[in-house]
Image (cartoon, grey):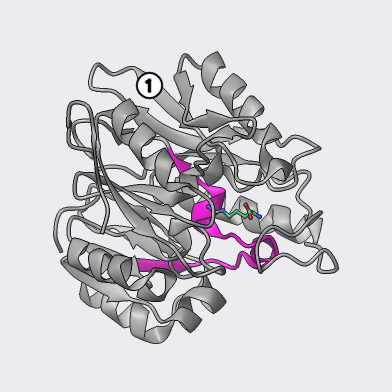
Amino acid sequence: MTEQLAWGTTYLAVRPDHFRVDYQINPFMDVSQQPDPALAREQWGGLVDTIERLGGSVQVIDQRIDAPDMVYAMNLGLGVERRDGSRHVVLSHMRYPERRMETGSARDYFAARGWTSSYVGQAGVGAHFEAGDAFAFRGDLVVGYGPRTEELGLKHLAMELDARVRGLRITHPGMYHLDLAFCPLDGTRALVCPEAFDNASAAAVLDLVPDPIVLTEEEALTTFAANSIVLPSPTGISTVVMPGCPDRVRAELVAAGFEVVVLDLSEFHKGGGSIRCLTNPVDVRLGRDLVHVPGGEVLLP
Ligand code: ARG
């Protein structure tokens, strides 16, 4: 196994006290298919317990009653630790007004804990950015754009973080966030569904990942396998916590030295998200997980 991810042990999550499907902003959502609230709480609790059992920690935020999608905490913002140890969050600027009120709560939450914050756009003005589109991998910030995040947002992110941003253009309506099609696993591996992207970006993502574990479109859409998280461990064996895992993918993960844990998150699939969407890693470090590039840089396929 190559070097484990250095990030992925500290997460934010939103307790699903008001999780509903009130509107449709992705192809999975159907207001006639409501989640079972008790089952959703049980599944979410099981995820939190699993993260803690694997040595991770979870900070829990209360859900706003008027924000049924806030449970998908990944989209609250991109948190980073600066090189001087201070913390900063680039808050999301949601594509759909239905979710924009979440940002105010996120800002207050982070501010109360001493984080600084910034925006790439807000309240419908400026570029959209949703943090489920942005993940550190091999020193770069890989950012999906198209359905949610806008291309202009990449430039703002690069400048704000002094980082190299690699954009990937998402064209698949069902993989509307990068985290539905791409999951960093370690220093060289990632789960990737090339069908999420246009041809140039599909080629670019396969170039970017030395040892990709490729998911078919059907696997990505029906199992949410890319919407997984990776818990590194002092033993050197990382665990991939997944909402579903086709046998072939499991065999590839095990051969690469990973442990695999599969959890049922069925209720959250009704809103179009799963494990990664429910958990926001806030231990990504500038200068360690993202290479310092003064002024930033954006690379597009
Ligand atoms: N209903 C939510 C939306 O459409 C789901 C968000 C899923 N989150 C994610 N990181 N992919 O915005």
Q: Is residue 47 magenta?
A: no
Is 293 drawn above or below residue 29 in the view shown?
Answer: above
How far across and down, in percent of the image, does residue 130 sit?
A: 51, 44
Q: Is residue 11 visible?
A: yes
Q: Quadrant of the N terminus?
A: bottom left
Report the side of 73 relative to 187 (left or right). right
Amino acid type assigned to the residue bearing label 1 in the image = Arg
Specify start and end residues of the magenta stretch as a single range.
257-281
Residue 249 on image: x %, y %: 35, 79
* In the depicted structure, whether residue 35 falls above or below residue 90: below
Is 268 rendered above or below residue 154?
below
Left or right of residue 51: residue 16: right
Residue 100 falls in which quadrant of the image?
Answer: top right
What residue sits 63% from the left and 35% below the top?
124
Give the residue displayed 23% in from the left and 64% down from the top. Answer: 189
Magenta span has 277? yes
Task: Give me the residue at 78% from left, 45% from top.
Answer: 18
- Residue at coordinates 54% horizontally, 43% vertically from top-left? 75
Pick whichever, 84 or 132, lies toward us: 132
Please, what secondary structure does the residue beneath circle 1 have? strand
- Residue 283 makes an appearance in the image: no
- Image coordinates of residue 242 in percent, x first then y, are 46, 65
Say which residue label 1 marks.
87
